[in-house]
Image (tube, grey):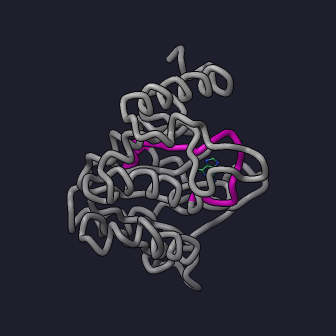
């Protein structure tokens, strides 16, 4: 998969993609991420990319021409399966959306900043909009890193143990079961006996039960989806 990201502060994202699983995905050649600075695509003086909004009101808006220049430039090099605008007024991101997007080949993500982007870019170019939750961030960059991480780890071959994404929380509308490691007793609390005796069938049963109980207790809404 290849992901292009357009942003006014690409530096905000670079380190998120340079470590851990995102790093491994790129080293394995399964994922490439290219961050593009919107200021490289403006023809306005002083690398201006934003302006006051028509009609008045607080906050700057990203102008349409630099965004269109950047998008057109990237579209000349590849065909995008989705052009995604990160925005708090989009549909809320979830595991199902991550699963769907992880099967795509080329994604383009547009990060807004300030009050957002000129509405005409949304009309003309954007095919998908994504919010990561009901709160407002200063820009789409942190949200884009969340989305890229969630998608990237689902690309086949990225995770070491291919089954481990299948046992994640949300993968089948269940939260993941509790996990334990050494020592067997910690501050008086013991690891559940069933996990220690090597009976894999019993362990699977315990995990399924624990996942169901946790979901009922913490996120009953998931069970009705
Ligand atoms: Cl995608 N962008 C911004 N600026 N704020 C957000 C968001 C996105 N998702 C939740 N809050």
> Looking at the image, is 91 positioned above or below residue 34?
above
Q: Which residue is drawn at 32% across and 59% down?
A: 160
Horizontal relation, residue 137 to residue 47: left or right? right
Residue 133 at x, y percent in the picture: 63, 41
In this rendering, the count of numbered labels is: 0
Residue situated furthest top in the rendering: 224
> Looking at the image, is 123 positioned above or below residue 13?
above
Residue range (magenta): 123-140
Horizontal relation, residue 136 to residue 80: left or right? right
Q: Which residue is drawn at 56% across and 45% down?
A: 179
Residue 148 at x, y percent in the picture: 44, 57
Residue 8 at x, y percent in the picture: 55, 71
For the N terminus, give its image quadrant: bottom left
Q: Residue at x 62, y 43 (%)?
A: 191
Q: Locate residue 106: give its quadrant.
A: bottom left
Is residue 136 highlighted in magenta?
yes
Q: Locate residue 131: give its quadrant.
A: top right
Q: Which residue is drawn at 39% across and 51% down?
A: 151
């Amino acid at each position: 998969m290849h992901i292009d990201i357009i942003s006014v502060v690409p530096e905000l994202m670079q380190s998120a993609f340079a470590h851990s699983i995102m790093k491994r995905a790129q080293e394995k050649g399964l994922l490439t991420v290219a961050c593009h600075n919107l200021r490289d695509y403006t023809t306005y003086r002083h690398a201006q990319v934003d302006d006051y909004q028509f009609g008045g009101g607080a906050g700057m808006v990203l102008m349409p021409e630099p965004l269109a220049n950047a998008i057109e430039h990237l579209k000349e090099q590849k065909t995008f399966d989705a052009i995604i605008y990160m925005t708090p007024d989009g549909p809320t991101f979830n595991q199902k959306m991550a699963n769907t997007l992880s099967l795509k080949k080329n994604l383009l993500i547009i990060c807004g900043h300030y009050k957002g982007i000129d509405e005409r870019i949304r009309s003309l170019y954007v095919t998908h909009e994504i919010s990561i939750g009901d709160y407002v961030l200063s820009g789409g960059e942190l949200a884009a890193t969340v989305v890229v991480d969630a998608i990237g780890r689902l690309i086949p071959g990225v995770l070491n143990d291919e089954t481990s994404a299948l046992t994640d929380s949300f993968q089948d509308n269940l939260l993941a079961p509790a996990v334990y490691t050494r020592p067997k007793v910690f501050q008086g609390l013991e690891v559940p006996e069933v996990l220690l005796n090597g009976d894999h069938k019993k362990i699977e049963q315990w995990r399924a039960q624990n996942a169901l109980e946790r979901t009922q207790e913490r996120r009953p809404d998931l069970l009705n989806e």
